[in-house]
Amino acid sequence: MNLDQLPIYEQLVSQSKMPLSLEKTLTPEKVTASVIHNGPISLMYGTSLADDTVLTLLQQLAREQDVISKYKQLLAGTKVNHHNTRSPNRGFYGTQQETISTFSTHIHKEPITDVVQVGIGGSELGPKAVYHGLKRLIKPKITPHFIANIDPDDANDILSRIPEKTTLFIVVSKSGTTQETLSNVSLIKAYLENKGLTNENIKNQFILVTANKSLPNNIPARETFYIDEAIGGRYSTTSAVGGVLLSLVFGPEVFEELLDGASQIDKASENPNIFENMALMSALIGIWERNFLSMGARAIIPYSQGLSYFTHHLQQLICESNGKRVNIQNEKVSYQTSPIVLGDVGTNAQHSFFQLFHQGTEPVPIQFIAFSEPQTHSNNSENNHDILLTHLASQMLALATGNSDSSPAKSCPGNRPVSLIFGKKLTPKTMGALLSFYENMVMFQSFIWNINAFDQEGVALGKSYASSYMFDSSPPNPIMKRILTLFETGKDA
Amino acid sequence: MNLDQLPIYEQLVSQSKMPLSLEKTLTPEKVTASVIHNGPISLMYGTSLADDTVLTLLQQLAREQDVISKYKQLLAGTKVNHHNTRSPNRGFYGTQQETISTFSTHIHKEPITDVVQVGIGGSELGPKAVYHGLKRLIKPKITPHFIANIDPDDANDILSRIPEKTTLFIVVSKSGTTQETLSNVSLIKAYLENKGLTNENIKNQFILVTANKSLPNNIPARETFYIDEAIGGRYSTTSAVGGVLLSLVFGPEVFEELLDGASQIDKASENPNIFENMALMSALIGIWERNFLSMGARAIIPYSQGLSYFTHHLQQLICESNGKRVNIQNEKVSYQTSPIVLGDVGTNAQHSFFQLFHQGTEPVPIQFIAFSEPQTHSNNSENNHDILLTHLASQMLALATGNSDSSPAKSCPGNRPVSLIFGKKLTPKTMGALLSFYENMVMFQSFIWNINAFDQEGVALGKSYASSYMFDSSPPNPIMKRILTLFETGKDA
């Protein structure tokens, strides 16, 4: 059923007309009392704009939309989904990961120095986020690089920085037809041939990750690992898409820890009690902010340098999953779905776009992420990390409660809803937990909005225009032609 | 005067009630006819939602708000502003850049291999964006790194990757009191001392860029370069803040070209005719989208890998400048100011959050940036760059005109306003032009909103809470204390 057809909907609308003031209601006790622990991470939601009355209604909303049953159906269903890649009974994915483990142990005995992940979208973003999340904690056995963009400036730059004879290339394309990836493979092969590598050399340095059984016919490779067609790129980090690269870079045992962290959150997400289920609580508060308080954007700000790329992954995960306008019955919905997502690490973001958060004309809900300990150590680390956390707490307080100065220019309205995801340290386990937490949050929101979080029909149109222009014999689209002609003028200038 | 007090305001409101359909009105001719060339870059705005009627009203709006006079007053004024750093009569900044030039030529004869910019906010974002924008085109003479975050994981990671004896550290802090930067200097010094460097060695590897004349007393340094207190960090890339680093990395002649590109746009921005002034046209269309079409976000998507960090700089530039709620008379305004800004390079973004742009429930205006030529060359570069531009044109067409499929899930509503900044190639000149184009666009929007783009009062509150917590003898804020206690629990777990 659509969100606005649920019995509870009108009560939530009524409730939203009684605005809450965090300046008046936020107490120290509320901070301590509003915490959920799931696996290695926790959520503190006491600084949000959902008070006890709202939370009771949101619990009812989850019940009416039957979100836990829907999740359990997904887990038990015959259709493969991303949770299978790390569930206790992994089946195919367990066997795959065993093969990957053996393979990477073997590679670690060879003089391989570098590995390049060639893939775009989910094939890049999740694995790259995890690499940067762990590289300071665990010394890489092999140095990874990423080639995604069809802009040749991406591939040429990476190729100029790798030793061509001791580098592996992992080509990741679920369909085996991604144009960016295939074009980059051509560019890379031409480069390696120019460097004097034989076809046999090249084959020996290529690895495939795909759902397309015929891809090895087109791209000769040393090894091919498989994933299911049904798992979307943005949900594939815990499959071979992340597994091959991360097992090569950090070792398969590290990747197993990541899977364990993700699995712990998957398990905790089965709990129908929103006060014990982080992903569900966070999803519901997000719905409150988006559909009842009309907030159009959402920021995710990790106070952890290791998570600097994680926000890019989350932009894809959230916006591509729930940036939809039709429900699962293929009818247009009449309420807002996914917010726009932006993010960067703190304290950097404090010195960048936080001015708008404090004094802009529209409030933006912010989810902070932080850890008790840094990943690295040096003489001043403890001190600087303490200052980092003090700034985090200061920002949360300032955003939530604001201030009134006699000068309007110095006043901050406050009442910006904030929340905090926290853990002891950014490790493979917490990294896996964070991945799964956001995947499940997105899934719960899609259930509530009654939309499909697992397709991305909207990206087809632009692709089809590009294909027609490049490959059809019919006359080119005249508007596209004029746009492209602008660049012809540029070239002559 | 406030935007909503101008005579033209109500006409714009009335006009906004007559929605335009790009599907019906966009023609190939309009693409070609809607182009402005300024210096080395151009703007195509024919795919926006501002038709001829709207543009006539916007021209009137610019006139009523007297934006060109305000700009000229800024240029001619006694108060130093960022335009002075690259104007034909640079005065102090000319002398500074001459000193920097001599200094960097000198350093290039020494065995210096690496340079670390230690600074946060504008001290990092602009210079970093320029470095990544040019590194593929011009081989760096010295390898740059950036330390910004007070999170010790940032500094420790960079320090582990540099040769400590042949690295320069440029400490950039306008006030000389930025806590992140001073804490990082302490961390770096402790690290270098541990590595056996003497105080004299360390002094010889430190360079300062500041407006604080007493900073050299606190941080002994080989050389100090100065900027004015009046120039905000986000506007300081063309001062010594960017000049020292970029002259060391690419050579002072490259930095001069960047200044020239910026200066060309500064000059072109003086033109009161909106059809000949890119920055003003783009500013006005942004106002149309934000204040009359109620669009709360804005995306900037370069189809150029070199601009991958530029979007971070623009997030700061736009949101910190115009994320304000009071006018220059210090009264609260009753209309929206800066939108939220997000961005990433294409085609990567097509495989990430573009689903939401095509089929999300709220339209997001998008400014694309692209160049006729790539920065690098290889066998397949031309072909892949052609595909890149074809995708760009396809996305612009798909977003603007949409499609109707018999299946609602496959339909895209279109009417997403898009525009295109284009040039021949990403060079020092175009990079400088892009910096100035966006600075001037932001300035024009601030004039129209009647707000001050050059302060950032909203960030003071969080800072003051942090300082009180760390340095005051009074009892700590109990809410902050509870938030920080959450991390204590984490440590024990």
Image (cartoon, coloured by chain):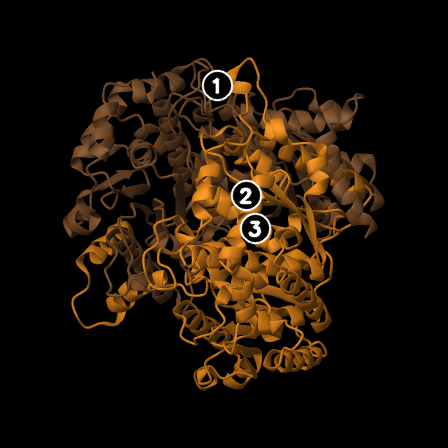
Chain colours: A orange, B brown
**Residue at coordinates 20% horizontally, 54% vertically from top-left?**
A482
Residue B247 found in image quarter: top right
- Secondary structure beneath dot 2 equals helix
Q: Is residue A425 left or right of residue A277?
A: right
Instruction: Identify the residue under disc 3.
Output: A59
Circles 3 and 1: CB distance less than 8 Å? no
Residue B71: % across, % down: 35, 21
Instruction: Identify the residue under disc 1.
Output: B80
State the separation of the CA atoms marked 3 and 1.
57 Å
N-terminal of the pair, mark 1 or mark 2, is 1
- Labels 1 and 2 in the same subunit: yes
Chain letter for mark 2, please.
B
Q: Which residue is at the far front?
A: A7
Q: Nearer the viewer, mark 3 or mark 2?
A: 3
Chain letter for mark 3, please.
A
Q: Is residue A224 left or right of residue A138?
A: left
Residue B435: % across, % down: 43, 37
Which amino acid type is marked by label 3?
Gln
- Looking at the rendering, in which quadrant would you find the N terminus of chain A? bottom left
Circles 3 and 2: CB distance less than 8 Å? no
Residue B355 found in image quarter: bottom left
State the separation of the CA atoms marked 3 and 2.
46 Å
Q: Would you call the spot at circle 2 few (<14 residues within 10 Å), some (14-19), or many (20 or more)?
A: many
Q: Is residue B95 above or below residue A160?
A: above
Instruction: Identify the residue under disc 2.
Output: B128
Q: Is residue B319 above or below residue B449?
A: below
Residue B132: % across, % down: 51, 49
- Labels 3 and 2 in the same subunit: no
Which amino acid type is marked by label 2?
Lys
